[in-house]
Amino acid sequence: MFRDDLLRGKRILVTGGGTGLGRAMGTRFLTLGAELAICGRRVAVLEEAAEAMRAETGGTVTTHRLDIRDAAAVEETIAEIWQDGPLDALVNNAAGNFIARTEDLSPRGFDAIANIVLHGTFYVTNACGKRWIAEGRKASVLSIIVTWVRTGSPYVVPSAMSKAGVAAMTRSLAVEWGPKGIRLNAVAPGPFPTEGASQRLSPKPGLDRPIEQLNPMGRVGDRSELANLAAFLLADDCAYINGEVIAIDGGQWLNNAGSFGHLAALTDEDWVEIRGRIKAAESADKARRR
């Protein structure tokens, strides 16, 4: 079903496209004929990813340093990308998350997630959307969210709230922008392990429950499965799919609401240790960016 020219002629921007799921999706788009733009905060990571993707696929990849929390920077970067020609699709993949008791969250901690996931996703979507509308272009937006938008989830309240907002944006703009030829959909992945997520969602050994207890299929997802679904939803062959939130989690969300309810058993001492581990991971991440 994925013929080699499925996405030929399309220019696609993937936010957070230098690592993890964003990189996997971008690589798949290239193999299907698309031209790719990736953005993120770490230039070295973007350049390394772009070089590897070009070597693997022979495709065209451009990199753009961008902190999507900055609305002015988003506008500037999208204008820069447009100078080489309009985009045909946007994948809102950039995100952030960490586990915490909600009573321990500071406003700064809440904003650290909401400013990326909710505000940043809107900034990029609107910057692209208003250009597509002005030019009368058909286009597609795909946002990567979570299954918790259906159930909520304890201990990741900023993410659950922000991702629910992105789901609402997807459904709202599917109706508002659909008549203009712009369709919006979202994918809600289950467990697809990445290094960054693991450091913040399972910073202490033993926090994860065995996947066999959580997932009806008894396994985690393969990145290629998510990448194929993303390509499917961006393809013109599926242009009648609009306003949908599609889970790709092996049925896990049907088996348990959210993914972190079991953390209720942790002690105060456990949470102190967890906060320390998350801060250490964040400090290491900042050091790598310098």
Image (tube, rainbow, N blue to C red):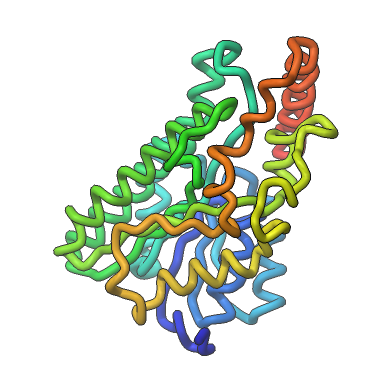
Residue at the far left in the pictured view: 179
Residue 165 seen from this side? yes
Q: Quadrant of the C terminus?
A: top right
Q: Quadrant of residue 25?
A: bottom right
Residue occupying image coordinates x 72% and y 21%: 265
Q: Is residue 77 above or below residue 217?
A: above
Residue 271 spot, x, y in % from top left: 73, 17
Residue occupying image coordinates x 64% and y 49%: 43
Residue occupying image coordinates x 71% and y 51%: 193
In the image, 82 versus 137, the foreground residue is 137
Residue 19 seen from this side? no
Q: Quadrant of residue 278?
A: top right
Q: Is residue 268 above or below residue 184?
A: above
Residue 11 spot, x, y in % from top left: 42, 71
Residue 200 spot, x, y in % from top left: 70, 34
In the image, 171 versus 286, the foreground residue is 171
Q: Quadrant of residue 89?
A: bottom left
> Number of numbered discs present?
0
Q: Is residue 50 left or right of residue 39?
A: right
Residue 220 spot, x, y in % from top left: 70, 57
Residue occupying image coordinates x 43% and y 34%: 162
In the image, 12 versus 142, the foreground residue is 142
In the image, 227 versus 43, the foreground residue is 227
Q: Is residue 50 left or right of residue 199?
A: left
